[in-house]
Amino acid sequence: MADYVLLTDSSTDLNKELRERFGVDDYLPGNINWPDGTTHDSTLDWEEITPQDFYTSMSKDAMYSTGIKGLEVQEAFFEKYLEQGKDILNISLSHALSNTYDTCRKAAENLKEKYPERKIIIVDSLRYSAGIGLLVSIAGEMKKAGKSIEEVAEWVENNKHRCHQTGTVDDLKFLAKMGRCSNVKAFMGSLINIKPIAEFNRNGENQIITKVKGYNKLYAAMIDYMKATIDPDADRIFVSHTYRKPQWLELQKIVAEAFPKAEIITTTVNMANGSSIGPGMLVTFYMGKEISEGLVEETKILEGILAK
């Protein structure tokens, strides 16, 4: 069985320590355009700006925009490993949020002509942030355990709709501007202290399915929803934020108390995703029941929780 590398992109929310822990061989940063007009790599390790400075600037109406690397850059990234005689498994950001997946797929098609003996498998995670990070972390563990490239790719493909998110963002203007949420405009308007709750849909988009008032009701609804949808054997929960540190710390505590058998991994959402989300996101990611079409079942669950 040929050796293979596990690759991803800068949407993954796995810092250097986590990438090393889970055996992520490499990732390709995208581009991020800063408010001053300069273009930078959207890396995962915050080398050029701190999360606090990044999200604080967005609170003051600074706007960042992102873009993908060109096809030739993606090909060069893959070819570096193909030249070493290694196969490639690349787990990509949701195609509903970016053209990253399509660029990876095109690069793989082009390179297969030059390296017909190599395997290049591109998986659309249909996730972002620590959602894709969770899938990549499990894939890395499977690779370390000796699973083949086909076995790992098949697991991700078959289980990505079991990767849930629940949480909120307290300022929807960035999501509305960037079009990164399927129904955000329905929840725009007067949102003082209102916390919309979003989940992944099967198209790989964020979809708001209800709203509550205040953080206390948000925490209670999130925990009840997680209890109703989480895999009983789930041993890993990511708790992420876009610079709402006090609430993030409180949520970590609440989640740890509710799910004492699970490891809580904490992350700050990367700049590639954060530029579209803005400050104020507070969210958990975990493996659970398969997500239904149109989030019909998930909506019913939350309606029942809020009706109590």
Image: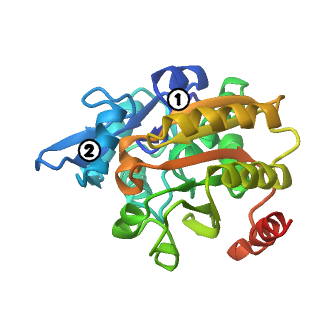
From this viewpoint, is residue 301 visible? Answer: yes
Q: Is residue 207 above or below residue 266?
A: below
Q: What label sits on residue 24 in the rendered view? A: 1
* Residue at the image point whose x is 16% and y is 50% from the top: 35
The amino acid type, in three-letter code, at marker 2 is Ser
Which amino acid type is marked by label 1? Val
Residue at 51 percent across and 56 percent down: it is 169
Q: Nearer the viewer, mark 2 or mark 1?
A: 2
* Quarter of the rendering occupied by the C terminus: bottom right
Could you tell whether 48 is left or right of 257 in the image?
left
Residue 174 % position (x, y): 37, 61
In the picture shown, does residue 107 fall above or below 95? above
Q: Is residue 235 left or right of residue 132?
A: right
Q: Earlier in the sequence, mark 2 or mark 1?
A: 1
**Res. 57 mark:** 2
Name the image quarter holding the N terminus.
top right
